[in-house]
Image (cartoon, helix red, strand yellow):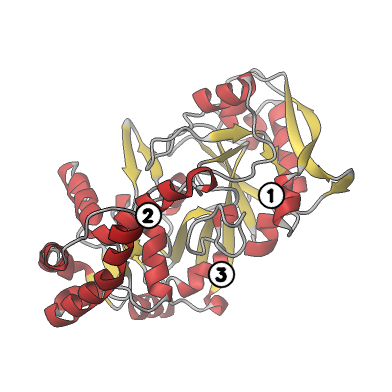
């Protein structure tokens, strides 16, 4: 049985958690393949709201085995706190599997993240300050600490001492901060070993055997396409690959075993942090989208920047991810607008451009070219089929589908699990 990938098709915060939760009844494994606790997924089940930061969204489905893959960076304190929080609410987390090859975020990673961002001043990227970037940097520099290192005190000590030999020089001499004692870090992280050991697994082997046995494996990214370190709006990106290609390296599943890639697409556009955003609204419409859509970061608590739907970005996401279909979320937020602008192209130096410019400077100067579609005033939150949507809402969905380059298989008309219209056999 092939695997499927679920990716954000914009700048993240598109509603991937809800999509994963919906698919929970149809899949056997849900794998988080990149990022860390810098991402947040909100899932609403009945009158209960769950905010997940590091754990795969599938952990809320009792029949799903949730997996944290090798491509994820883990803050063990955050992980255990999140597990405890779910356990206290009656959620069984015992089936969680964690790759021994996943890298660990340490106190010095978090400290460096914060002081570096502050040092950049106006050139800051807008990181969450949770140590994600420095941890991935250590991974690439081959000086990182992995989950499996927790179980060998000698190796763990050597790695921590070697890392702090250089990093303390930076903290003290460049950033005027106190040095971090290696013994304190070692003591803290050795304390996590026994608590994490029950979840440790050779996840690449587990997933391979699951696929051979005909199980369904869902791979979920933590952020969106435009935050991909290779394919996003660099340097205002995350430090890993949330695009579909990252699902292979971050999980150990080969590309030939993936046959479906679902893009999660919000009916408008949002972004957290710094960086270019052509359709950003700095007016009453932007504030209304933020208020009605509840656009505040699950992890950061920061207000999201809001703008109209950008079809240029959607087409780009279709191309670089090889998207087979879309899940369109938050259509209900647009209820009440008489006219709804949609960005169909950019104007750059007097030229009309219909594909995302590869040149960073061009994208920074891109101005949206809008087409205006008629809005609707009817409440759509109770709609169960596409035919029950107002005609103008149907036309809006069809227009976005045509502009984006892939069919829309599901539509979110409210935050709840049951507030979803399924078409084209989404599940």
- What is the x, y in percent for residue 277? 64, 41
Asked if the residue at tag 3 contacts the one at tag 1, i.e. Cβ–Cβ closer than 8 Å, the answer is no
Residue 82 in picture, x, y percent from top left: 24, 49
In space, the residues marked 3 and 2 are separated at their CA atoms by 26 Å
| Of the two numbered discs 3 and 2 in the rendering, the one whose residue sits closer to the viewer | 2
Give the secondary structure at mark 2.
helix
Q: Secondary structure at mark 3?
A: helix
Above or below, 207 against 289 in this view is below
Q: Position of residue 173 (x, y in %)?
A: 31, 60
Q: Is residue 1 visible?
A: no
Is residue 307 placed above or below 79 in the rendered structure? above
Query: Foreground residue, 109 or 64?
Result: 109
Residue denoted by label 1: 313
Q: Pick out the residue farthest to the front.
A: 173
Q: Residues within 10 Å of mark 1 (few under 14, many from 20)?
A: many
Up/down of 256 relative to 223, above or below: below
Hey, which quadrant is residue 369 in on the image?
top right
* Depth order, front residue of 72/253: 72
Task: Tell me the distance, in whole angstroms, between the alpha carbons under discs 1 and 2.
Answer: 29 Å
**Tag 3 near tag 2, CB within 8 Å:** no
Secondary structure state at the residue bearing disc 1: helix
Real-space Cα distance between discs 1 and 3?
18 Å
Q: Is residue 370 in view from this perspective?
A: yes
Q: Residue at x 37, y 68 (%)?
A: 69
Q: Earlier in the sequence, mark 1 or mark 2?
A: 2
Residue under the point 64% across and 29% down: 281
Q: Residues within 10 Å of mark 3 (few under 14, many from 20)?
A: some
The residue that appears at 16% across and 70% down in the rendered structure is 197
Which residue is disc 3 drawn over? 245
Left or right, residue 39 beside residue 348? left
Count of picture labels: 3
Query: In this figure, which residue is indicated by the disc labeled 2?
Result: 113
């Amino acid at each position: 049985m092939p695997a499927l990938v679920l990716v954000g098709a914009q700048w993240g915060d598109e509603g991937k958690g809800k999509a994963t939760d919906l698919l929970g009844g149809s899949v056997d494994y849900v794998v988080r393949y990149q990022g860390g606790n810098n991402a947040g997924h909100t899932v609403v089940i009945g009158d209960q709201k769950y905010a997940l930061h590091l754990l795969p969204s599938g952990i809320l489905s009792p029949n799903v085995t949730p997996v944290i893959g090798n491509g994820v960076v883990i803050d063990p304190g955050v992980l255990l706190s999140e597990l405890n929080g779910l356990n206290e609410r009656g959620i069984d987390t015992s089936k969680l599997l964690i790759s021994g090859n996943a890298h660990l975020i340490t106190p010095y990673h978090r400290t460096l993240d914060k002081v570096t961002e502050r040092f950049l001043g106006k050139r800051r990227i807008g990181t969450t300050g949770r140590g994600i970037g420095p941890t991935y940097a250590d991974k690439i520099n081959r000086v990182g600490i992995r989950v499996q290192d927790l179980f060998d005190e000698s190796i763990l000590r050597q790695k921590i001492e070697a890392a702090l030999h250089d990093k303390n020089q930076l903290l003290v001499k460049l950033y005027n901060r106190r040095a971090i004692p290696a013994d304190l870090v070692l003591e803290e992280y050795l304390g996590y070993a026994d608590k994490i050991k029950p979840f440790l697994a050779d996840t690449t082997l587990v997933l391979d055997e699951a696929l051979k046995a005909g199980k369904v494996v869902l791979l979920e990214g933590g952020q969106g396409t435009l935050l991909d370190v290779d394919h996003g709006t660099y340097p205002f990106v995350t430090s890993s690959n949330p695009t579909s290609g990252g699902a292979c390296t971050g999980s150990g599943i080969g590309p030939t075993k993936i046959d479906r890639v679902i893009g999660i697409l919000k009916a408008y556009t949002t972004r957290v942090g710094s960086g270019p955003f052509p359709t950003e609204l700095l007016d009453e419409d932007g504030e209304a989208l933020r208020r009605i859509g509840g656009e505040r970061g699950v992890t950061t608590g920061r207000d999201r920047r809001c703008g109209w739907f950008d079809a240029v970005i959607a087409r780009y996401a279709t191309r670089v991810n090889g998207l087979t279909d879309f899940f369109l979320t938050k259509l209900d937020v647009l209820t009440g607008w008489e006219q709804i602008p949609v960005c169909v192209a950019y104007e750059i130096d007097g030229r009309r451009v219909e594909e995302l410019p590869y040149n960073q400077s061009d994208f920074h100067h891109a101005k949206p070219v809008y087409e205006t579609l008629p809005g609707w005033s009817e409440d759509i939150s109770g709609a169960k089929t596409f035919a029950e949507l107002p005609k103008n809402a149907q036309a809006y969905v069809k227009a976005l589908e045509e502009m984006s380059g892939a069919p829309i298989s599901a539509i979110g008309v409210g935050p709840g699990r049951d507030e979803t219209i399924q078409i084209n056999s989404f599940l």
